[in-house]
Amino acid sequence: MKFEIRDTFYLDGEKFQILSGSVHYFRIVPEYWRDRLIKLKSLGLNTVETYIPWNVHEPRKGEFVFDGMADVAGFVRLAKELGLYVILRPSPYICAEWEFGGLPAWLLKEDISVRSASEAFLRHVREYYQVLLPILKPLQITEGGNVILMQVENEYGHFADDGAYMEAMRDLLLEGGITVPLITSDDPREESLRGGRVKGALATGNFGSHTKERFEILKKFTEGGPLMCAEFWVGWFDHWGNGGHRTGDLERSAIDLEDMLKMGHVNIYMFIGGTNFGFMNGSNYYDELTPDVTSYDYDAVLTEAGDLTPKYDCYRKIIGRYAPLPETELPAPAVKKAYGAVSVKERVGLWESLALLAEPQESICPRSMERLGQNYGYILYTSPVRNERKLTSIRLLKANDRAAVFLGDRRLLTLYDRELLTEHELDAEAEEGQPLRILVENMGRVNFGPRMNEQRKGIDGCVQLNGHIHTHWQQYPLPLDNLDKLDFSRGYKEGEPAFYRFELTAEETGDTFLELDGWGKGCVFVNGFHIGRFWEIGPQKRLYVPAPLLKKGVNEVIVFETEGKASGEIVFHDKPDIG
């Protein structure tokens, strides 16, 4: 089969209107992919779009993962089985409110300029594509598959104007055997579209309103080709502490969707958002750091848990005026379970667990996570007090994102974001040899904008104590990917960072939503799977636990809490509460 771009899109010589929705395979457990795609098709859509996050597929340099939630080829083949076409966006940068915009954290071990024509960056992209593209190549419609478009880069015109980089990214795809048409996507301002375009790729726009005006601007850059909104934003994302769950304007978006279908082509972003499992949420940074919550509900067409929303019926009626609606029987709604309250079985302190979880690395001054070979999670810096008998001030130079400072077991202060830029007063009596401990959390790397090159996590400079540089540190990387090594008999002190173990007994498995009322801040693991972060400041109050993560019988839940605030129980509900 052949897919072409002329005045519009053509499939085997016939005009083809792209009606697409975004589904990120890496934000949904594979057992639910079919459910979400059937619902997408029933909406009247003929295509599914997904990003491909580099940091998921090459989590460590030279180590590649393409199975489980990372089985992009399996996702594409399932879409074909269901009669759907696919748009792939394999750019090394995806944004997507995803950690570091999809770039692997290990890039920051080097002094490297990401998303540029620097050979240091392109070498890593080239080596990644040498593994990725042979997997994608046979999925193209030109080779019997169902992939009809691929993206060169993502919103590059808003980031920089390195035309040589865009040409290099295009050429890597072509050299890797990509033969389907290529696209770029940028916010529909002339400056961005000029900066993000590259010869041989159709320019598309990303926006959520004012379709007619946006398409008029885009028309100047398509050279007579079709008009497409590659991301029709129907909702928005949430960040910690922003006061509530953000929602879109359904009445307004219905008008814009109708206009798009009259004038061109659409990809609904998001059809379903899914979940930022693990430590994979991104952040934005304008005047302050705003890390995203665990839920990526996005006020999408489907909820985070895959349930229909009012958008579904509204959009289906609109789409039905432009395309035949399939007579698809929708899957039955997922079973939701309220398992109720579960009390803590065991607990153990972080200090007591360090020797089991991490090998200390020593240096004169603290080093960042990335320079120590760590990507995500927490890192603990510890050094004995030597000459000071009273601590009067502390300053952490080149530190990100959130640091809790302890003298022995006593918490002295917690610093967040811009508080890390200045010196802070202390008033603490110290004994020689008493450990000074600094626990730093990576809250999620910036996924958009110019700060992407300046965000090493942990401490990448030095610690000033009473005005002088305090030296000789032991550093404990804590990615928390080895909690099976915990020994809950090692001890616990009230008020310190700690691990709490629960046992949930389930006679029947179902989707459930975990609430941690009375807890401070931390993350949760269910049967070894990291379901994400929690923070008492909200807006998200409950964490989504898909049924496939549970088993009949006893399920182990481990909560890591950093503030010394633990209620002693957790509660499982049958409804979400994302603010």
Image: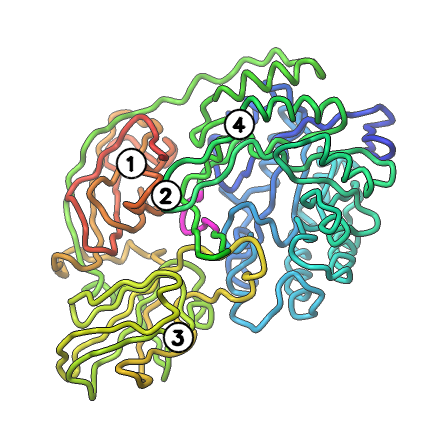
Q: Which of the two discs, 1 and 2, labels the residue nearer the N terminus? A: 1
Q: Residue at x 37, y 43 (%)?
A: 531
Inter-mark Cα distance, 4 to 3: 43 Å
The disc label shown at residue 514, or none:
1
Q: In the picture, residue 162 is in which quadrant?
A: bottom right
At label 3, which amino acid type do we have? Leu
Q: Residue at label 4?
A: 249
Q: Which of the two discs, 1 and 4, labels the residue nearer the N terminus? A: 4
Inter-mark Cα distance, 3 to 1: 37 Å
At label 2, which amino acid type do we have? Ile
At label 4, which amino acid type do we have? Asp
The disc label shown at residue 531, or none:
2
Magenta-drawn stretch contains 280: yes
Q: Residue at label 3?
A: 397
Inter-mark Cα distance, 3 to 2: 32 Å
Q: In the picture, residue 534 is in which quadrant?
A: top left
Towards the viewer: 78 or 326: 326
User: Which circle, 3 or 1, is nearer the viewer?
Assistant: 3
Question: Counting other residues with Cα less than 10 Å from the Cα at mark 4, is it few (<14), some (14-19), or many (20 or more)?
Answer: few
Residue 569 percent coordinates (x, y): 17, 40
Inter-mark Cα distance, 1 to 4: 29 Å
**Picture quarter with the N terminus:** top right
At label 1, which amino acid type do we have? Leu
Q: Which residues are magenta?
A: 276-282
Inter-mark Cα distance, 2 to 4: 29 Å
User: Which circle, 4 or 3, is nearer the viewer?
Assistant: 4
User: Which circle, 2 or 4, is nearer the viewer?
Assistant: 4
Is disc 3 placed on a helix, strand or loop?
Answer: strand
User: In this rendering, does residue 524 appear at all?
Assistant: no
Question: In the figure, is residue 65 to the left or right of 547?
Answer: right
Is disc 2 placed on a helix, strand or loop?
Answer: strand
